[in-house]
Amino acid sequence: MTQINIQYFKHPYAEFVLGSYGGKLCLCDFRYRKMRESVDNRIQRGLNASFVEQNDAILTRAKIQLEEYFFGDRSVFDIPLLLVGTDFQKAVWNRLADVKYGETATYLDLALSIGNESAVRAVGSANGANGLAIIIPCHRIIGSKGELVGYGGGLSLKKRLLELEQNLFI
């Protein structure tokens, strides 16, 4: 397989780029984020494949589930995922996926969950490199004093997503 199917998905909350490879979602990220090129390059290099703008069943399913999430009708995604990154990044993203809808955790919580309390900064970096926004819920990670910190979609969107999850908990 030499191609990653991608589609652009515009929603009132944000505009996304979605990508699938081998029947799994490998990309769900903000189209205009600062790290766009870095994330795209990592995924294409990691899969030894290029982006081709083409729809498929996984991308259609991702759009439907994202719509349901934004309408408050979905709290868990059930799309098969393909994580593309280092072993450390994948470990962080897997723990990140355990942060439940309507809850938050800190970078320290994540570091402790992977058994490396001193890796708080590295955990923050891995969190920022997450290419599966919303689905791997990096927006649920907050600062140690409860403050909103760093988010690829911007802090105003992060705040809006956390409010959505608090108000529409299902």
Image (tube, rainbow, N blue to C red):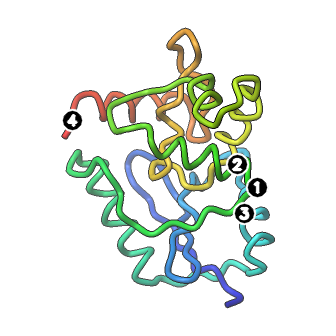
Q: Cβ–Cβ below 8 Å for labels 1 and 4?
A: no
- Considering every residue shown, the one lying at the far bottom of the view is 1
Mark pair 3, 1: CA separation: 15 Å
The mark lying in front, picked from 1 and 4, is: 1
- Judging by the rendered image, the residue that carries numbered circle 3 is 40
The mark lying in front, picked from 3 and 2, is: 2
Residue plotted at (38% across, 30% down): 162
Q: Position of residue 62 (x, y in %)?
A: 40, 67
Q: Cβ–Cβ below 8 Å for labels 3 and 2?
A: no
| Label 1 secondary element | loop
Give the position of the N terminus as an image quadrant. bottom right
Q: Position of residue 166 (x, y in %)?
A: 28, 28
> Sequence order check: which comes first, mark 4 or mark 2?
2
Mark pair 2, 1: CA separation: 5 Å
Q: Cβ–Cβ below 8 Å for labels 2 and 1?
A: yes
- Judging by the rendered image, the residue that carries numbered circle 2 is 89
> Sequence order check: which comes first, mark 3 or mark 2?
3
Give the residue type that dot 3 points to: Asp
Mark pair 3, 4: CA separation: 32 Å
- Judging by the rendered image, the residue that carries numbered circle 1 is 86
Q: Residues within 10 Å of mark 4 (few under 14, many from 20)?
A: some
> Sequence order check: which comes first, mark 3 or mark 4?
3
Q: Cβ–Cβ below 8 Å for labels 4 and 2?
A: no
> Sequence order check: which comes first, mark 3 or mark 1?
3
